[in-house]
Image (cartoon, rainbow, N blue to C red):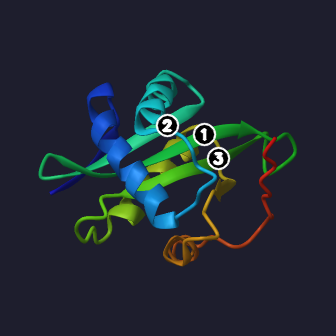
């Protein structure tokens, strides 16, 4: 049975594995963050009121997660934008409907806060991820360019 709930500190080591799998599948050498560093960062996210981190459980085992942030953007459909920065699923088995369930749950979290304008980060290197976001109604909006110093 699928359950969506707020992530906890105890979830982070397993969720970090989903994050790492996603980065490996994207084959993006610009990502240099280690799993340990991701866990440290995610620990801080759990205590940040601007952030939501939800996990999907199937039969009591984590199978995916989503991270969303409230981004101040005065004048853009209100004063804030809901920014989904991470969505990752366990890549070792089929997770039918889990991604959509996580997106619906994060949409509800934003709606509870009066935020209706949403955007999602998605790698150009992942056509599957791009197709997923389009399937839930996402449209191309802006080009985001990486500037590394």
Q: CA distance from mark 2 to mark 3?
A: 10 Å
Using the rendered image of the protein, determine whether residue 104 is visible from the camera's viewpoint.
no
Mark number displayed over residue 52: 2
Residue 53, horizontal then vertical, whole percent? 44, 39
At label 3, counting other C-alpha atoms closer than 10 Å, the crowd grade (few under 14, some 14-19, many 20 or more) is: many
Determine the secondary structure under disc 2: strand
**Mark 2 or 1 closer to N-term?**
2
* For residue 58, side relative to residue 99 (left or right): left
Circle on res. 88? none
Task: Identify which residue, 8 or 101, lies in the foreground.
Answer: 8
Screen quadrant of the N terminus: bottom left
Using a 10 Å C-alpha cutoff, classify the residue at mark 2 as few (fewer than 14 neighbours), some (14 to 19) or many (20 or more): many
Q: Is residue 76 above or below residue 42?
A: below
Q: Quadrant of residue 16?
A: top left
Q: Residues within 10 Å of mark 1 (few under 14, many from 20)?
A: many
Precedes in sequence: disc 1 or disc 3: 1
Q: Are marks 1 and 3 in contact (CB under 8 Å)?
A: yes
Front one among 20 and 131: 20
Q: Is residue 10 left or right of residue 85?
A: left
Is 70 situated left or right of 59 in this image? Answer: right
In this view, the residue farthest toward the right is: 75
For the point 48% across and 49% down, the residue is 106
Secondary structure of the residue carrying tag 3 is strand
For image coordinates 48% across by 31% down, the residue present is 37
CA gap, disc 2 and disc 1 = 6 Å
Quadrant assignment, res 78: top right
Query: In the image, what residue occupies the spot 77% across and 53% down?
Result: 146
Q: Earlier in the sequence, mark 2 or mark 3?
A: 2
Side (left or right) of 98 relative to 3: right
Q: Which residue is mark 1?
A: 69
Q: Are marks 2 and 1 in contact (CB under 8 Å)?
A: yes
Label 1 vs label 3: CA separation?
A: 6 Å
């Amino acid at each position: 049975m699928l359950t969506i709930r707020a992530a906890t500190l105890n979830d982070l080591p397993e969720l970090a594995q989903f994050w790492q799998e996603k980065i490996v599948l994207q084959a993006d050498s610009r990502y240099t963050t280690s799993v340990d560093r991701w866990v440290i960062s995610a620990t801080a996210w759990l205590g940040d009121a601007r952030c939501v981190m939800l996990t999907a459980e199937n039969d009591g085992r984590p199978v995916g997660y989503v991270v969303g942030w409230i981004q101040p953007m005065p004048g853009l459909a209100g004063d804030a934008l809901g920014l989904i920065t991470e969505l990752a699923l366990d890549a070792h088995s089929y997770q039918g409907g889990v991604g959509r369930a996580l997106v619906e749950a994060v949409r509800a979290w934003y709606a509870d806060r009066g935020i209706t304008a949403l955007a999602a980060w998605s790698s150009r290197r992942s056509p599957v991820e791009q197709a997923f976001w389009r399937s839930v109604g996402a449209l191309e909006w802006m080009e985001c360019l990486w500037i590394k110093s």
